Image (cartoon, rainbow, N blue to C red):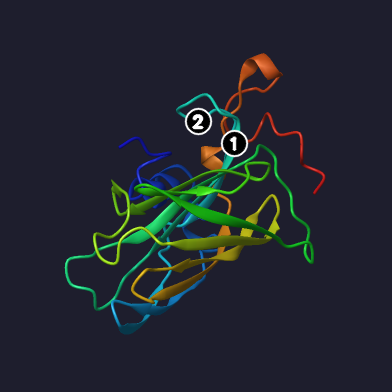
Amino acid sequence: MTRFLSRTALPLLACALLNSACESPVASGECKGTHLGQSVNWPISSNAVLSRIDFMEDGTRSTAIELSYTPDGVEGLQDFGVDIKLVKDVKIQEGGSKTVKLLPREDRLDPEETSLVLKWKGNMGDAEGYLAAPGVPVEGSVTLDRIALDHAEGHFVYRYKDGGELTCTFNVPEYGLTDITDDADGGGGGGGGGRDDDDD
């Protein structure tokens, strides 16, 4: 599966290239609700990040949020999360929350409209997809409360056919080393040189 960056490589790369990155703000949040009839509370992983990448693997200009939670107490499940593609240079000010419905399409969820959320991709660690049980959620939504240069904040909700429901909150920092620009747009390569939104 093609991923934005290896989930385990992100913190290691940060520490190797920039010592201060090891002391940078870390993600906060949790998944709470009912999974297969059991009450759960899964903490967010420190690997969850916001990244601004001008061109994804399919050529789309996008802002990306990678979320990963640790499903404590669930046998055989190491990670649970989602990769979210947003429109390029998206900004949401505090108090200006936006909610997008997520609709089931065969073996996946798709955003109801793509003016904000371009793509929604469930994952379980390094594997793309959803849990075999309870399966793809029958209903979902994502609410973005704030997206700024340094972090993204919000939550998403999954509702399952068996009656289970998860509400997953996130407040994730930007990972500056994944900011990649295209020289054709006047950008100067990595490190944020091509941003046009530094006034936020």
**In the displayed structure, does residue 106 sit left or right of residue 64?**
left
Residue receiving disc 1: 62
Locate residue 95, reporting x and y percent. 79, 66
Of the pair 98 and 71, the residue shown nearer to us: 98
Q: Are marks 1 and 2 in contact (CB under 8 Å)?
A: yes
Furthest toward the top, the residue is 184
- State the image coordinates of residue 190 (x, y, percent, origin top left): 57, 30
| Mark closest to the chain's N terminus, 1 or 2 | 2
Q: Hey, which quadrant is residue 96 in on the image?
A: bottom right
Between marks 1 and 2, how big is the CA–CA gap?
A: 7 Å
Q: What's the amino acid at mark 1? A: Ser
Snapshot quadrant of residue 194: top right
Q: Is residue 119 left or right of residue 153?
A: left
Q: Secondary structure at mark 2?
A: loop
The residue at 61%/27% (across/down) is 181
Q: Which residue is mark 2?
A: 56
| x and y percentages locating residue 62 in the rendered image | 59, 36
Name the one closer to the observer, 175 or 64.
64
Q: Categorize mark 2 by other alpha carbons within 10 Å: few (<14), some (14-19), many (20+).
A: some
Residue 149, given in percent of the width and then of the height, sits at 69, 49
- The quarter holding residue 113 reads top right
Label 1: which secondary element: strand
> Which residue does the image show at 24% across and 78% down from the upper left?
73
Q: What is the number of the mark on residue 27?
A: none
Amino acid type, label 2: Met
